[in-house]
Image (cartoon, helix red, strand yellow):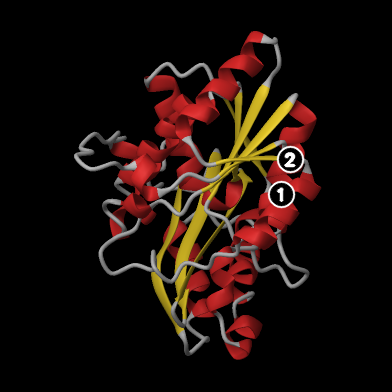
Amino acid sequence: MKTVTDIENMQSYAEKTRREGKVIALVPTMGFLHEGHLSLIRMADKAADLVVTSIYVNPTQFGPSEDVDQYPRDIDHDTTLAQQAGTDVLFVPTDKAMYPQGYQTFVTAEKLTRSLCGAFRPTHFRGVTTIVTKLFNIVKPHIAIFGQKDAQQAIVIRQMTRDLNFDVEIKVAPIIRHEDGLAMSSRNKYLTPQQRSEAPVLYQSLCEAQKMIEGGERNPNVVKKYTQKMIDTIASSKIDYIEIVDAVTLEAVREIKGNILIALAVYIGKARLIDNILIKV
């Protein structure tokens, strides 16, 4: 595995790979890799000749009071895991390289970023779309792979890719969960042992919501109220949102029908955790 930190070197390597007729797949990450990330890398390895995994904690997708400085990092461990999963090139740029002095250009997606996480983290998706655009221009992938756990992010990236005519195929991989159902996340590290034992209530509440819908419930407010009641049993929880939306437009639904995304964001202690399920009614 080759590690690259310089943008021009990464671009040159990508251009050479493309001239050779090889397919490049990009897996963008913020590091502190876990099985969820590794599943993306394995998918990329099956789909492409060259797998580039980027590790970059992007400061522009964090708000002023968020955890950019505390975000967990372990580049040595990440390097080992990335190589074992099938990464060919590990791209690890610096803040100075990605956002040099005088930087002033950002990419903004409009409607899709106003709800769900966008409502609570108003500058978050501007940072996401900007960094992904930069990675597309640096790595020059044919394929980019994202995780379903960040459902809104995946939908926003698909829209941005279409709108800006990027010649990149976006693939979305399923959520990888611990045995007790908790979605794997780098921020799970923030959980105390007690909070870790309680956090699976998020997925349990989504499963109960699915059962209600499969049983015939079509009122989103009834489903959301029951889901909230389950989560509220955890003393350390604080709900940002529980929403039932159209799985394409992310617009709230008045009646549960069609392709539905049930998404939530909940603080358990200081860890802000997100999860979701897709349902076809």
For mark 1, give the secondary structure. Answer: helix
Q: Tell me where residue 104 sits by quadrant.
A: top left
Q: Quadrant of the C terminus?
A: top right
The image quadrant of residue 88 is: top right
- Please tell me the numbered disc located at residue 245: none
Q: CA distance from mark 1 to mark 2?
A: 9 Å
- In this picture, is 158 found above or below 254? above
Identify the residue shown where x is 66% and y is 57%: 78
Residue 179 screen position, x and y as percent: 78, 69
Q: Secondary structure at mark 2?
A: loop
The spot of residue 81 in percent (x, y) is 74, 55
Q: Are marks 1 and 2 in contact (CB under 8 Å)?
A: yes
Q: Earlier in the sequence, mark 1 or mark 2?
A: 2
Establish if 198 lies above or below 178. Answer: below
- Which residue in the structure is indicated by mark 1? 82
The front one of 20 and 164 is 20
In the image, taking residue 72 as reference, residue 183 lies left or right, namely: right
Mark 2 belongs to which amino acid? Answer: Met
Kindly identify which residue carries mark 2: 1
Q: Nearer the viewer, residue 199 or 277?
A: 199
Label 1 packing within 10 angstroms: few (<14), some (14-19), many (20+): many
- Name which residue type carries label 1: Ala
Residue 116 shows in the view: no
> Is residue 105 found left or right of 210 in the rendered image?
left
